[in-house]
Structures are given as structure tokens and as C-alpha cells.
Image: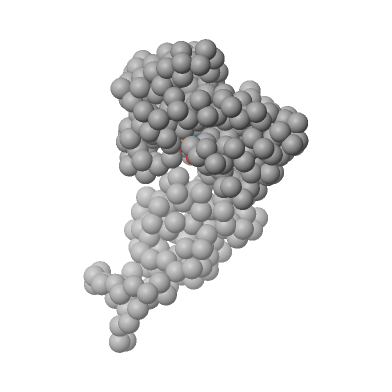
Amino acid sequence: MRHPVLIIDKEKLKYNTKSILKMCKEVNIEVTAVTKACCGNPEIAEIFVDCGVRILADSKIENLERLSKFQVTKMLLRIPMLSEVEDVVRCADISLNSELKTMKALSDVAQKTGKKHNIILMIEMGDLREGILAEDALEYAERILRFEGINLLGVGTNLNCYGGIIPDEYNLSRLASVADSIEEAYGIQLQIVSGGNSGSLYLLRDKKMPSRVNHLRIGEAILRGIETSFHKKIGNLHSDVFSLRTEIVELKDKPSVPFGSAGFNAFGEKKNFMDKGILKRAIVACGRQDVLCEQIIPQDTGIEIIGASSDHLILNITCANRQYEVGDTIDFSLSYGALVAAFTSEYVHKVFF
Ligand SMILES: *Cc1c(COP(=O)(O)O)cnc(C)c1O
């Protein structure tokens, strides 16, 4: 096996996917599975589809292209760029939108190709990333309904991202009432009220999800088994679907404080070092170009990360729970950010078992 490698446990991923789908189905919520953290990896998408996912979503066209072989609905999560509207209509059946200029362009392209492109109008609920202000919703809806290449499929919101605002009964009820008022004003039915991402799942457990919310876009909860508002484990979902395996290339006893005249490190930082005497240090072949080194955790609880450069991760293995030799491997658990980085690095191999 080549290292570093991201090891992916298919059975655990299946279990997580099925559990989330079941949980949501019980309260009439359709789950769109989000593949962006795994760069639209087709093997992962295949697991989602086999488990019953009917919509796959990603934030990048490149990833949606990678998913084109799956006969399910595709959704573009990030507000489209004006320069990519042709690709959006070609690769996605649904996109999340907030700009009339872009929706007009999507409509024109869709009309030319004889398709209807579906729009979820994003409403700002306080997190201050994408979305129109709620008070502008009727005006936007009126304009959108006149775009002939477009079908206004519903409204949605995104929370937990920029401002760290938590989805709750209050902001999601407001989203639902925006949907109601659009329906009332224009005599239409909106199929989807999309109430957010993995951060919204705790509302199911607490039985506080407004009944009008019938759609969620879920990535991290499936991949890591946690909800992202309070970072609590969901039921008995697996939080160890992924692990990162690295290989030891150097093993030496060395001092804990660098010697010589001190300047900047490889990343332009000046660091202070504490003298902890001579340490048993291991270098593994994996670094900042491959993963967020501050956000991985050695599975051997006696190991401590002491530093990293682009391709080297330096570990203190003085108190490790076993003996290591050059060529041995050391495994790590990953945060969401570290997982995204590992998937994005072509130097990190991916192995399913
Ligand atoms: C990334 C993203 C999601 C999925 O978020 P998770 O926290 O991984 O569930 C949902 N919606 C939008 C708009 C996103 O950008």
C-alpha cells in the first residue's frame, strides 16, 4: 500500500448514510447527500446512491461532472458564477441561487437547450453567507417566476457556516413562512423548503424541526457521524469512517529545542520552543500540503504532534503505547477540514475496504 493513504470503511459509511436517511424520512425530510468534502468521489457517491439517496449535491462543477454517470438528480450547492451558467445547466438539475442576473442567465441557457433549470432561492437567516434578505423574497419570486427557462422549486437557507449561527425553531420557521408567503402571493406551490446542512439535524432529535422543512443537504453528518451545531455524535453513527495512515521515515532521539541562530521556519513563522529534554522523535511522510496537520489526531494516544512542514510531520513518540520502527505506520483521525484537505491532495492515496 502506498502512503500516506486515506482509508475508507465502506460498511461504516453505508451504516451512517442509511441511518441519516431513515431518521429524516421519519419526519418527511428528503436528504440530499453532499459530496464536496470528498471531491465528488464516485465510489462514495455510489454508496450514497445504493443506500437510497435520490439527489447528490456538490459545490463544484468539476465534481458534478465526476458524478454524471449516476442516474439521480444533481444539485449545485454554491451560488453559480455567471461565467459557468452553461456548465451549471448541463451538469446540475437544481442550483442554489440569490442573484437575479445569474438566474436570468441560467434561464436563457436552459431555454436554448430546451430544459427547465430548477432553482432554490436562498434566504438569509442570519449566518451572513449566501441568500437574499427575507423581506425581499416576494419581489425576487415575482421576477424569477417570469424567467421562462427556470422553475422555482423552493426556498432554502444555509447556517452554521460563516457566522456560526445555529439553526433553530425560530429561524427555520421564518424560512417556512417565507415559503408560505410566496405561495400565497403567486398562487404556486413550492416543493422544497431546504432547512440547512448537518447543523440542522439536532432539531430532529429534539423534535423541534418546523414541519414545513422537508429537505436537508447533508455532508459531514454522514461522513463523520456528528451534527455540526453542537458537535455531538448522532445516535450510534460511526465517527471513524476515515483514517489517515502515514509511514515513519526517520526515528531519532533529539533535543526539544532547535540549536543554532533562530530565524523563520518554512512557513515564515518564528516559534518559541520549550525545553522538554531529549525526545524520541519520529518523522512521517505527510505534511501541510496533504492535510491540516493541526487537525489530525494520532490514534495511539501516547503520540503528540510537535510540528509540520510541507511534506514532513514531526511526532513525539516518547510516551507512545508501542514500539515503532522506520517503515512502521502511524494512523490518525481527521477533523472535517483535515478530511477535505486529504481528499483534495493527490498525494494522499484513497483506499476503500
Ligand atoms: C457544504 C454545504 C452543505 C453541507 O454541509 P455539511 O455541514 O457538510 O452537512 C449544505 N449546503 C450548502 C449550501 C453547503 O455549501
Residue shown at 49% from the left, 57% from the top: 291
Please state the horizontal and vertical placement of residue 63, each as a whole percent of the image: 64, 45
Please state the horizontal and vertical placement of residue 276, each as a whole percent of the image: 25, 69
The answer to whether residue 93 is above or below residue 24 is below
* Res 194 seen here: no
> Which image quadrant is residue 172 in?
top left
**Is residue 177 rendered to the left or right of residue 65?**
left
The answer to whether residue 286 is above or below residue 49 is below
Color encoding of the figure: one colour
Residue shown at 30% from the left, 74% from the top: 270
Return the residue nearer the eye: 131 or 231.
131
The answer to whether residue 318 is above or below residue 243 is below
* Res 339 seen here: yes
Residue shown at 35% from the left, 78% from the top: 264
Return the residue nearer the eye: 146 or 229.
146
The answer to whether residue 176 is above or below residue 34 is above
Q: Quadrant of the N terminus?
A: bottom right
Residue shown at 36% from the left, 54% from the top: 302
Return the residue nearer the eye: 183 or 77.
183
Return the residue nearer the eye: 237 or 90.
90
Please state the horizontal and vertical placement of residue 46, each as a whole percent of the image: 67, 34
**Is residue 108 rendered to the left or right of residue 304?**
right
Q: Quadrant of the C terminus?
A: top right
Please state the horizontal and vertical placement of residue 55, each as a whole percent of the image: 62, 28
